Image: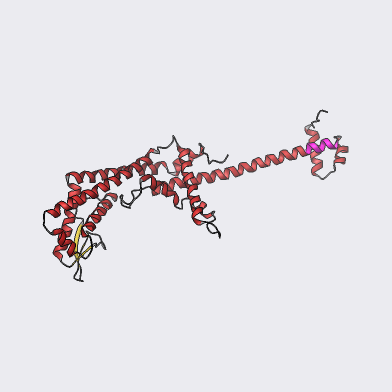
Amino acid sequence: MKKRILSDDEFNRVLRLKQSGTRWLKIQRETGVPRRIAKRAYEDWQRNQSFAELKESRRTVAAEVFREHIDFLIKVGKFLALHQGVPATLPSEAPQGAQIVDSLWESNVIEELQNCSMLAMPGVDVLRERRSITRQQRMLFEALQEHTRGELRWEALQEWEDAWDSCRQLYVKLGKEAVSVMQNFLSQEKGLENRIENGSRDKDAMTHIVDRLLREIWSELREDRFDPQRDIFEVIARTDNKVYVAVAGLGNSNFLTFSDRDLAEKAARLGNRVARNLLLGRNGGNVGKSLQERISKMRQAMEELADMLNPLVLRPIILRTRCELCPA
């Protein structure tokens, strides 16, 4: 038997009566529609209403999740832009560029992920939970790149990494040059090395001098106050009958202690001669200039990253693109 379809007028009368609490038998008498047909039409209508409400509910949830997704991606971009600089850690001691970028996601980038985590619950493996949060933040970074691929020049980040890796190599080379230059100067004055080593109250005075001058060269290059003519070390006499070799103009930077001022002067002068030769000499000077160039490239890459990861730039791009993490 062919299924009877109620007209709009018939169904509206059935619906009005049923919603007022009328029984099916009475509805049949008042509308002339068999109660089974009326009941089936009403139940079909209810199912359709539930489905429509479900669809609307899902659209609302999807919109909220997508809004959160956008906020997370923008926070990841902002964090990268703010924390991608010229590392203060010496190049010889810091990891490679790609490792530095990857380690950023171990920080508290997305506070919501940290707040919603189970870190405070008893019996939870804290390290495992933190690794889970780190993975989520790395996934968000990958999602940001996916959203902006073809829109932003992510090569700038690779250029930053390459420049930093080059700094690491050049810094090691500069250290070897420093040792070579120092040995050359020491060979010109017989017994000077032993006198300084024996006169200093600190062991391995030569190593301290090289390490400290390299640190100061890197610091000046990093802070863009590089002056190859400036003395790096000076001698400071205290009232305790001790004489110190310190970084010129930098308080609390004593690193060698002597009783003999003449020896302290010789140690400071040696360090300054090595530094000046490194920065102005034929070989070392080239290394210093190369370090300057790499740091300049890092700064250029940082500025480009800051511009392209600006929320005003990111938001419209994310809105018109998709990634695997986007809600359906």
Pick the residue in front: 6 or 260: 260
Q: Is residue 109 visible?
A: yes
Does the segment drawn in magenta span residue 37?
yes
Main SS, magenta region, reads: helix
> Whole-percent x and y of residue 124?
54, 57
Q: Residue at 68% across / 39% down in the picture?
A: 52
**The magenta segment:** 33-42
Q: Residue at 51% across / 51% down in the picture?
A: 113
Pick the residue in front: 258 or 22: 258
Q: Is residue 317 shown left or right of residue 24?
A: left
Write down the quadrant of residue 199 in the picture.
bottom left
> Whole-percent x and y of residue 7?
79, 31
Q: Is residue 237 above or below residue 34?
A: below
> Whole-percent x and y of residue 180?
19, 50
Q: Is residue 209 shown left or right of residue 142?
A: left
> Whole-percent x and y of residue 82?
40, 49
Q: Is residue 229 visible?
A: no
Where does the N terminus fall, quadrant-wise?
top right
Q: Is residue 301 shown left or right of residue 46?
A: left
